[in-house]
Amino acid sequence: MEVLAKEWFWAMIQAVGVLMTLALIYRQMRLQTASHVVQTLGAIHHRWSEDAMLRARHTVCKRYIEGDVTFDSVSDYVGEFMEELGTYVKINAVPPDVMWDAQSWYVEHYYCMFKAGIEQTRQANHEDTLYQDFQDLFAILKNQSKRKGAPSVDRGPADLRLFAEDELRVTTAFLQLQQRGESMAATHIAERDA
């Protein structure tokens, strides 16, 4: 009987040890996943704020305000970025609720701005899957909006115009800041080398 009690005790100790090890492994995996998502969001933010993207967003919104809704290579540049965001959600690199927090405002508006152009591009190329991840992302984020109690509507012309005006102000400010920064850096280098 004493032998059975000792065996049971050691079996229980081993089971507790295994469970604790599994819990620690699970915690470590969650931390690594969170770290990966943070890095991915940083890369997304960097690309969204880089000079070429700011110029593309600026151009698209300026033309939209002027009544030009052409879906051309500049629009395609922004659309391809949104397509990549959709792919990140599709492959679970970024959870939908996190993408909603980070980019839903832009996805919802740019998708509605580009929707007709995307359809025309699909028809012209006989390819129904062009921008499918962007379209799916729009639907996913729209559902996230419903779950979070946020407005979940297709943006109409008045909403899109207000968005375009705001984007125009934001991109203009960022581009001016970048230009000032480059100018200040050039001045600093010239002063240093003088």
Image (cartoon, rainbow, N blue to C red):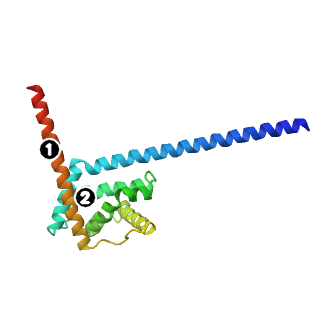
Q: In the image, which is nearer the foreground, mark 2 or mark 1?
A: 1
Identify the image quadrant of residue 83: bottom left
In percent of width and height, residue 136 lies at: 39, 63
**Looking at the rendered structure, which numbered label has been put on residue 180?**
1
Q: Residue furthest top?
A: 194
Please indicate whether residue 16 sits to the left or right of residue 145 in the image.
Answer: right
* Front in this rendered view, residue 166 or 63: 166
Query: Is residue 65 visible in the rendered structure shown here?
Result: yes
Quarter of the figure with the C terminus? top left
Q: Residue at x 12, y 35 (%)?
A: 186
**Looking at the rendered structure, which numbered label has been put on residue 76?**
2
* Front in this rendered view, residue 143 or 71: 143
Q: Is residue 76 above or below residue 188?
A: below
Three-letter residue code for mark 2: Asp
Please indicate whether residue 110 sits to the left or right of residue 33 in the image.
Answer: left
* Front in this rendered view, residue 10 or 73: 10
Query: Mark 2 Cα within 10 Å, few/some/many (few <14, many 20+)?
Result: some
Identify the image quadrant of residue 74: bottom left
Three-letter residue code for mark 1: Arg
